[in-house]
Image (cartoon, rainbow, N blue to C red):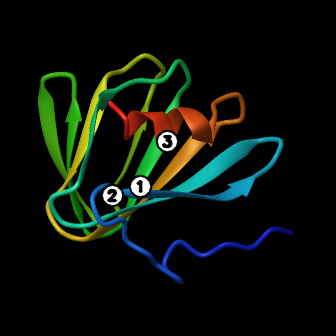
């Protein structure tokens, strides 16, 4: 068994979201992204499908030209190669589930865009 908590030991990045891998196994990678209000991840995409869940807070989530306001408990799934972005409307915790072939390094690279 592997244990992790999305809501304990929260640390915020001063200038950008903080990305923390919590669980990696042969099936998935579970990532916590912690945003301060106003922080964002610029438009990006991955070759693999992803699932994004708002654990806490409120995120303005862009998919292509469309915008969605996602609140605590909301979850979305995207196929690969779909351009998306995230903007925190308040302090937020986001769960990102990656395909086993995707990488945490790629997610960290989004912050450098």
Between the residue at mark 1 and the residue at mark 2, the CA separation in whole angstroms equals 6 Å
Residue at the bottom extreme, as displayed: 8
- Tag 3 residue: 108
Numbered-mark total: 3
Disc 3 versus disc 2: nearer the observer: 3
Measured as percent of width and height from the top left, residue 95 is found at: 47, 57
Front-most of residues 98 and 91: 91
Mark 1 is surrounded, within 10 Å at the Cα level, by few (under 14), some (14 to 19) or many (20 or more) other residues, namely some
- Earlier-in-chain disc, 3 versus 2: 2
Q: Residue at x 33, y 57 (%)?
A: 74
Mark 2 is surrounded, within 10 Å at the Cα level, by few (under 14), some (14 to 19) or many (20 or more) other residues, namely some
Does 107 appear above or below 92? above
- Tag 1 residue: 53
Q: Secondary structure at mark 3?
A: helix
- Earlier-in-chain disc, 1 versus 2: 1
- Tag 2 residue: 74
Measured as percent of width and height from the top left, residue 34 is found at: 39, 64
The answer to whether residue 30 is left or right of residue 39 is right
Q: Quadrant of residue 106?
A: top right
Measured as percent of width and height from the top left, residue 45 is found at: 40, 24
């Amino acid at each position: 068994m592997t244990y992790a908590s999305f809501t304990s030991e929260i640390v915020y990045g001063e200038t950008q979201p903080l990305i923390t891998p919590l669980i990696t196994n042969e099936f998935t990678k579970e990532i916590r992204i912690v945003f301060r209000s106003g922080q964002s991840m610029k438009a990006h995409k991955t070759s693999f499908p992803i699932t994004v869940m708002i654990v806490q807070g409120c995120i303005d989530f862009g998919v292509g030209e469309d915008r969605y306001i996602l609140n605590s408990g909301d979850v979305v799934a995207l196929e690969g190669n779909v351009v998306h972005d995230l903007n925190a409307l308040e302090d937020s915790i986001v769960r990102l589930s990656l395909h086993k072939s995707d990488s945490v390094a790629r997610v960290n690279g989004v912050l450098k865009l």
